Amino acid sequence: MADVKMAIGIDLGGTDIKAGLIDSNGQIHLNKKKPTDAQKGGEFVLNNLIGITSELLLTPEAKKSEILGIGVGSPGVIDPITGKVIDMSPNLPGWTGTEIKASFEKEIKLPTFADNDADVGALGEYIFGAGKGKNSLICLTLGTGVGGGYIKDGKIFHGGLGGGEFGHTTIEVNGRNCNCGGKGCLESYASANAIAEYAREVVARTHDTMMEQIAGSYDKITSKIVYDSAIKGDNVAVHVIEWSAKYLGSAISNFINILAPDIIVLGGGASALFDFMKNVIYKEMQMRVYSKSAKETPVVKASLGEEAGIVGAAALAFTSIKTG
Amino acid sequence: MADVKMAIGIDLGGTDIKAGLIDSNGQIHLNKKKPTDAQKGGEFVLNNLIGITSELLLTPEAKKSEILGIGVGSPGVIDPITGKVIDMSPNLPGWTGTEIKASFEKEIKLPTFADNDADVGALGEYIFGAGKGKNSLICLTLGTGVGGGYIKDGKIFHGGLGGGEFGHTTIEVNGRNCNCGGKGCLESYASANAIAEYAREVVARTHDTMMEQIAGSYDKITSKIVYDSAIKGDNVAVHVIEWSAKYLGSAISNFINILAPDIIVLGGGASALFDFMKNVIYKEMQMRVYSKSAKETPVVKASLGEEAGIVGAAALAFTSIKTG
């Protein structure tokens, strides 16, 4: 009996490292998680990644499989050819300059591929998730921030280095301040943080709402509380979500106007709000998408859930390896 | 002596048809222009295009050259593979469904390629103009409307059909009404029409400005008058241009955040205002472009001028023909 073909998928986050042994159908056979300990520096994090990979390779599950390669999703700008970290946000100090691909291939002796985590997540949804069977896809991850990736013809589409920053496109020139230093970025309207922040602003003005009761005080409202309150029928929470959806729908319209993907996939924590958002998103698309046929582009929730990162990283390995 | 290799470039506009005999260095050897007579319908326009091409082919200049093929730039959504018009704005009635490529190849017996006019203009700047030698480029045409094209690795980049509508991306969710039915589109801030309209609004409030004196009355101000007044030092005109530049700079930042091209090229009539705009554009880019290196993306004026359309169409022919 031929060995099952597997890849190792690694998802590097600011808080945790996740890694898994994943087959070519996207099934996770084994997975591990440990803290990133980002403050210990880039070299420590790299050794941590290589360590968790070595542990996975020593398991009986790995030993009875054929491991084709390793995929790594990392925050920051990653050169997809060299697998080197070009530019990094401050939550992984000392990570810029890390040679992910070269270091793995030296230590582990398996073909390794690295790319930006949002791109890798998008590839996962394309190969194994909500975009399966489509020719092109944009996946937006609505988490603490807003990430995005564009997949076309089976591959992550890279414009130049520094592209793919969908979350930092302006949708309101004089709009809300963003952490990036910009104004009116999508991220400052559609991230989980932005939703919680706007809810706190609204409740600070009105008080006496379900959200405040659940949170104890208005300044403790989280995006989870907004969601729970909306589910229970709180109009203020629904207003907050629809406010966010209007900006999200406008930004989605922009991405369609530029790239016209076959489908838009929404992942990350805030995509839990999708049921409250979708009508507003479609309404904005009707108004703002220029081409008639593209107005009907489907917008759906991601299907890979919490393990999207490692499954996407495995997809990167599978699609990058030339199985001759 | 070998014949000079030429292509025929055709630029279909709502008002005029332009066609030229262009060599592989982008030099125009001969060109013709006639009215489109768009109201006579799609079949008439097609025959008009084929007619002007036949006339060019009968000239001595054409007869002593080797004509490799024909390129056509057309408004609307064009399928780049089949050369068929998929979707068209109302200024060319009956043009949707026209089989440009098939009809030309049947009548003229030369390989023919058709694409959207803004994309074709961008390709011209990439191959022969301000983007020569770069790997990727976005060209925005600031005319009556705002068009755009993205070129990467020597080819027009097509997302899905209906993509590439850079002028109809939202930069202000609750912003100015656009002709397309949207709100806050780039086109409603950065087209020549938008600049003239905003100038009329400003002068209607303040009166007694240079622009009003030149125009005779405030409601006759054109973008040309804005430009002439700015040149002469009129602060109100400069304010109008800088207002437009702020939105244009924000939209350019968006396109860089998504695609990170090597260069941004600005063409069309309103690009004459570039000298008044560039500092504002660069300031917006410093604030809004996310990746540090991409903040320095050069923004330059197009170099092909009024004949960009036919030169770009010839570039489409040259780059599409597989010269074995």
Image (cartoon, coloured by chain):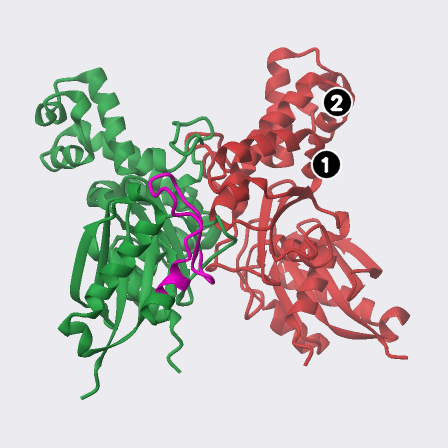
Chain colours: A red, B green
Q: Mark 1: few, some, or many residues within 10 Å (few <14, many ≥20)?
A: some
Q: Which mark is residue A88?
A: none
**In the image, is residue A87 part of the stretch drawn in magenta?**
no
Compared to residue A308, the image places residue B313 above or below, namely below
The overriding secondary structure of the stretch rendered in magenta is: loop
Q: Give the magenta range.
A: B79-104
CA gap, disc 1 and disc 2: 13 Å
Q: Secondary structure at mark 2?
A: helix
**In the image, is residue B98 part of the stretch drawn in magenta?**
yes
Kindly indicate the quadrant of the structure image that contains residue A310.
bottom right
Pointer 1: what residue? A272
Q: Is residue B9 left or right of residue A248?
A: left
- Count how many numbered circles sit on residues in the image: 2
Kindly indicate the quadrant of the structure image that contains residue B137.
bottom left
Compared to residue A36, the image places residue A243 above or below, namely above
Q: Which mark is residue A229?
A: 2
